[in-house]
Image (spheres, helix red, strand yellow):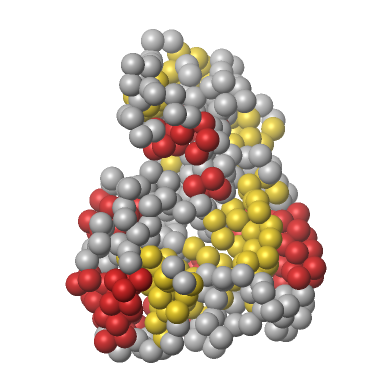
Amino acid sequence: MPYVAVHHLEKCRQCGACGEMVACPGAEELICIGCGACVLTCPHQALELVEAPREREVTVEINGKSATVPEQISVKDTLREAGYQLAVSHREPGLFAPCEVGGCGSCAVEIDGVVKLACRTMVREGMRIGTELPEGYVPRRTVVNFQGHSMGGVGTPRQSQGNNGFYLEAVCFTAGCNLRCPHCQNWLITYLGQDEALTPQEAARRLTMIREGLELNRMTVSGGESTLNRPWLTMFLREMKTLNPDPDARFHIDTNGSLLIPDYLDELVDAGMTDIGIDLKALETDTFMRITGLSDRNLAQNYKETAWEAVKYLINNYPEKVFVGVGIPYNRGFTSPSEISRMGQRLFEIAPSLQVTALNYRREFRSNIVKPKDMEMMVIRDILRDMGLKTVIVQTTAGNIGP
Ligand code: FES
């Protein structure tokens, strides 16, 4: 169903959160694409997603066939209205449209002969839409903040050392995410539209320049969610490998793992991925839904199990080729020590030597959770160690404490 955001002026206190916390993908053209990002930010419930009006209609052509749809909806919703399937996981067919804010570039279609994003282009009378992209089309994605990173991520081996004594990795961040976590720590990037959409080659060149300048051999792509645009990511890794032929170079992906089905993992390893950090979120589906903001239980179950299976698949199939680290978020506001213990048990059954990082989830974005005290995090570390895991790192206010 197509949606549009409405502004309840009587509830608005003009705090400015909606304008500051997310970059509205339709702001430039003064349109609402119904992504709901602004609704997430409002602390006063002054913004609401409602069904888009249907009084007026437009007629368009989709893959040569005529279709009549409501006016004021995006091309993505136009396709859905016309009976085309939209997908948010790689286990289902259809046009992949997982972020809805113009960040990932996955929903590109041909509109009146030009490739545009279906989620952030509004339909109009007489539009011609083609779901097959022209041959040779090179994917684009919003990628920002190319920089040195001193901490690394859950997929950075504990023993890694930066060559210049400070930075560990050269990193870039991809916009768009398939989750809507209330505690998102990178919301400015997650909800960023297509301001700096780069080809894989352009992004690889920029990250390589940072790596060379800092004399590092580790390169990371994080997010948002780095794995949303599959052809983009695969091409990016291949280009990185070509530009950085040093046999010691490490190519690290930081991900929630929810889309990483086995053939996608094979593709990433083949393209050059050497390290991966997977944030597992939860063991129970209810907890996963609380952490990610998902309301569709089946989808939450699918995402959660795909991430867990991805860890197992990599350990079983690429033990020598890929370093795997796992992140477990902790905050007593959404999970329990007992669930952490059961996560530890499941990870132990996959591989006792797996590097596990307990992450202290705190108040970020639109969440009010209280940051766990360091002592509380040390208890979580001990719970994971007691399950037999040998490499447990814990995030504290004093930095990461490892084995
Ligand atoms: S779904 Fe349209 S850019 Fe991500």
Report the front residue among 223 and 44: 44
Residue 279: x %, y % from top left: 42, 66
Report the front residue among 101 and 187: 187
Q: As drawn, is 401 to the left or to the right of 205?
A: left
Seen in the picture, residue 292 relative to 355 is either above or below; the reply is above
Residue visible at 33% across and 16% down?
10
Residue visible at 50% across and 15% down?
58
Residue 374: x %, y % from top left: 35, 71
Q: Is residue 370 visible?
A: yes
Seen in the picture, residue 331 relative to 137 is either above or below; the reply is below
Q: Quadrant of residue 1?
A: top left
Residue 35: x %, y % from top left: 45, 34
Q: As drawn, is 391 to the left or to the right of 283?
A: right
Report the front residue among 346 and 84: 346
Q: Quadrant of residue 207?
A: bottom right
Residue visible at 64% across and 59% down?
172
Residue visible at 47% across and 75% down?
400
Seen in the picture, residue 189 relative to 392 is either above or below; the reply is above
Residue 87: x %, y % from top left: 43, 46
Seen in the picture, residue 179 relative to 107 is either above or below; the reply is below
Report the front residue among 20 and 144: 20
Q: As drawn, is 2 to the left or to the right of 270?
A: left
